[in-house]
Image (spheres, rainbow, N blue to C red):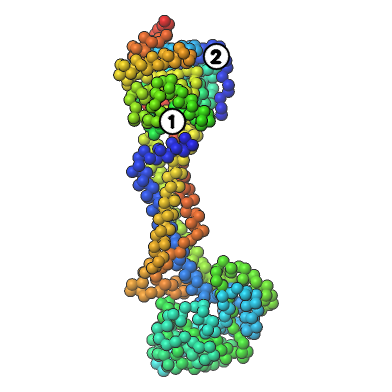
């Protein structure tokens, strides 16, 4: 205990230096935490959007679709499969069907390539927020096969507005060119060029009409309340649909590009913070080493009265650990407070860029809402203390190399 | 790493034989000790006297295991220092030797009581026992009531008394004191010498001083004169 108390008092000898070092570690850790929480919130938002728009937490699709997403790979009897899925995952927030086909959309003024997403309007509305992004018109109605929603840039290319007619032409199933007539019901703007300029939404029944079998779907997507339940739900769906011809994937495998994007972005962030951590650690080395060099004579006396080099090294390491631990606690408190403050109104980066942008094909909001990464919250104290410990190793080593007589006569 | 039990003190507590200490000062080799032979018996109150550079402090440091000789041997309390490793040497200093330095060299962030009990803590003495012993030792050196003061709040004489308390509280076989009165005024120096004389007479603690101070020489029961790294005279009173 006296050793611990001695280490703490040694740190208080030069209060200003200790406080500056602690401020450096604390602020570094707090900034690291806030930055990580912003990235974590942004990644979560991106994943939520991607999962809801592009897949679902669990996806059921025709076997081989993931490797070769051809419009010909559809599931027949999609209603029956949906019922089975719903029974297997009763806690699912929503189970909805989609069909994806592509083709050409024409107006009297222009023709553009298009990705058509056939959806169940009432259910789709519950899982994606495109209805919030309507700039004109209204959301699709169940059963109205002629309704179509266009992105703003596509509407502009085609020179159409709400109420105008457009014609779809494509050959999704049989190879024969087929056409459908739609009337623009609404126009949306997500901010993602790939979606606003290329994707249209229509009721699923309209696209099903292009196929010989009426009850087809490309995808049955299961939406859960929490991503933590994905593995369990995937297992349950696989058990319920143990038949050939289907593939059942968790979202990580259904949209691997998004998963990899988030991982890469997180790793990049971690790399930056590792560099910052090393710079902060240099500050700790400086403080502890200066503190050691200032009292070489005193350390020599301690050795003279019988303190072993190992005990001296432990005392120096304890000083580093106290510095790291106290700074980590302060840093985490500051980090939590800053995260909380920023999360209230979000960080608005929109300005001239509009309120959203696209990353890996997913529209992401430019108003960032940090979220506390609770897993990493447990790691920050270890990072603070760990860096301080590592930074104290060199001064501690220096102490063990001292000889009493040289130390006592050190000027 | 702990030290083997000390043999019963039948002979001298310190035996120095043909001790040589050379060191480099730039390109010059300084011969600080040139074959010193010295025995110190238990209970002696010995002063090493001599001009600056005569080798007093080097001899004291060599006996205390603080400095490594270039040749010869030093046996302290039955342990030949050349044959003990760093840890054993620390243990010997901790349990069998006490040190008093010219500049007091107390730990500035610890109180008088904590400075005194520091050695006992290193010895592994339990908290209550070491506190009681440190209090008792501070009383012996006349510092009752000063226990809670830090070195900066004590006079030079009081600080040196704390240093003496730290040196004797671990019940060493020998206390090595390097110019203990050099930084004290005449009155304080005199009081400190009287204190150490008292500890020597009443408690049988062996003292070995390196000093210039005639007061210490007067108080010593034996005076060893050094010059140019050699013993010139060895006077017993």
Residue at 46% from the left image edge and 23% from the top image edge: B136
Residue hosting label 2: B9
- Mark 1 or mark 2: name the one nearer the start of the chain: 2
Q: Dividing the picture into quarters, in which one does residue B214 lie?
A: top left
Give percent across and percent down for residue B184.
32, 20
Q: In the figure, residue A72 lies in which quadrant?
A: bottom right
The chain holding disc 2 is B
Q: Is residue A235 left or right of residue B176?
A: right
Report whether mark 1 lies on the same chain as mark 2: yes
Q: Which residue is nearer to you in this view: A161 or A224?
A: A224
Mark 1 vs 2: CB contact within 8 A: no
Q: Name the residue under label 1.
A: B114
- Residue ranking furthest to the left: B185
At x 44%, y 50%, the residue is A328
Comparing B81 with A345, the one in front is A345
Q: Residue at x 62, y 84 (%)?
A: A79
Q: How far apart are marks 1 and 2 (CA)?
A: 31 Å
Kindly identify which chain the residue marked by label 1 belongs to.
Answer: B
């Amino acid at each position: 205990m006296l050793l611990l108390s001695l280490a703490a008092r040694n740190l208080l000898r030069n209060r200003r230096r200790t406080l500056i070092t602690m401020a450096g570690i604390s602020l570094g850790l707090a900034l690291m935490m806030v930055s990580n929480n912003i990235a974590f919130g942004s990644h979560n938002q991106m994943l939520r959007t991607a999962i809801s728009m592009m897949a679902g937490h669990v996806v059921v699709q025709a076997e081989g679709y993931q490797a070769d997403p051809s419009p010909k790979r559809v599931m027949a009897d999609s209603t029956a499969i949906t019922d089975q899925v719903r029974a297997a995952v009763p806690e699912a927030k929503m189970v909805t069907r989609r069909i994806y086909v592509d083709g050409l959309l024409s107006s009297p003024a222009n023709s553009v390539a298009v990705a058509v997403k056939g959806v169940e309007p009432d259910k789709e509305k519950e899982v994606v927020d495109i209805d919030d992004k309507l700039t004109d018109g209204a959301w699709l109605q169940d059963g109205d096969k002629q309704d179509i929603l266009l992105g703003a840039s596509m509407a502009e290319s085609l020179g159409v507005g709400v109420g105008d007619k457009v014609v779809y032409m494509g050959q999704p199933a049989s190879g024969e060119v087929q056409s459908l007539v739609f009337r623009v019901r609404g126009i949306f703007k997500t901010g993602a060029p790939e979606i606003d300029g290329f994707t249209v939404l229509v009721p699923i029944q309209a696209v099903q009409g292009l196929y010989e079998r009426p009850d087809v779907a490309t995808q049955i997507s299961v939406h859960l309340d929490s991503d933590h339940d994905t593995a369990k739900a995937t297992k349950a769906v696989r058990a319920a649909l143990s038949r050939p011809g289907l593939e059942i994937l968790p979202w990580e495998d259904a949209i691997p590009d998004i998963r990899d994007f988030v991982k890469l972005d997180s790793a990049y962030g971690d790399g930056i913070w590792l560099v910052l951590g090393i710079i902060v650690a240099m500050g700790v080395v400086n403080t502890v080493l200066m503190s050691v060099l200032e009292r070489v004579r005193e350390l020599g006396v301690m050795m003279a009265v019988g303190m072993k080099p190992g005990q001296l090294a432990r005392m120096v390491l304890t000083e580093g650990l106290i510095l790291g631990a106290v700074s980590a606690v302060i840093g985490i408190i500051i980090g939590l407070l800053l995260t909380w403050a920023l999360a209230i109104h979000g960080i608005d980066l929109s300005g001239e860029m509009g309120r959203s942008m696209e990353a890996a094909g997913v529209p992401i909001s430019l108003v960032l809402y940090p979220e506390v990464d609770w897993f990493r919250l447990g790691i920050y104290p270890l990072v603070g203390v760990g860096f301080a410990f590592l930074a104290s190793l060199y001064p501690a080593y220096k102490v063990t190399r001292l000889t009493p007589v040289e130390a006592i006569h050190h000027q | 790493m702990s030290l083997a039990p000390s043999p019963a003190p039948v002979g001298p507590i310190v035996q120095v034989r043909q001790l040589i200490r050379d060191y480099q000062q730039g390109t010059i080799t300084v011969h600080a000790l040139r074959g010193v032979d010295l025995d110190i018996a238990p209970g002696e109150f010995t002063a090493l006297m001599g001009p600056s550079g005569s080798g007093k402090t080097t001899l004291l440091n060599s006996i205390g295991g603080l400095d490594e000789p270039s040749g010869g041997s030093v046996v302290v309390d039955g342990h030949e220092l050349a044959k003990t490793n760093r840890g054993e040497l620390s243990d010997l200093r901790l349990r069998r030797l006490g040190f008093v330095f010219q500049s007091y060299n107390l730990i500035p962030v610890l109180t008088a009581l904590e400075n005194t009990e520091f050695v006992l803590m290193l010895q592994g003495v339990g908290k209550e026992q070491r506190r009681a012993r440190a209090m008792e030792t501070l009383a012996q050196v006349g510092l009752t009531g000063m226990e809670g003061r830090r070195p900066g709040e004590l006079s030079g004489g009081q600080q040196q008394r704390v240093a003496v308390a730290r040196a004797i509280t671990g019940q060493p076989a020998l206390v090595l004191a390097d110019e203990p009165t050099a930084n004290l005024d005449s009155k304080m120096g005199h009081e400190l010498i009287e204190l150490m004389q008292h500890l020597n007479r009443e408690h049988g603690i062996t003292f070995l001083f390196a000093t210039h101070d005639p007061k210490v020489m007067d108080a010593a029961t034996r005076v060893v004169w050094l010059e140019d790294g050699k013993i010139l005279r060895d006077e017993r009173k």
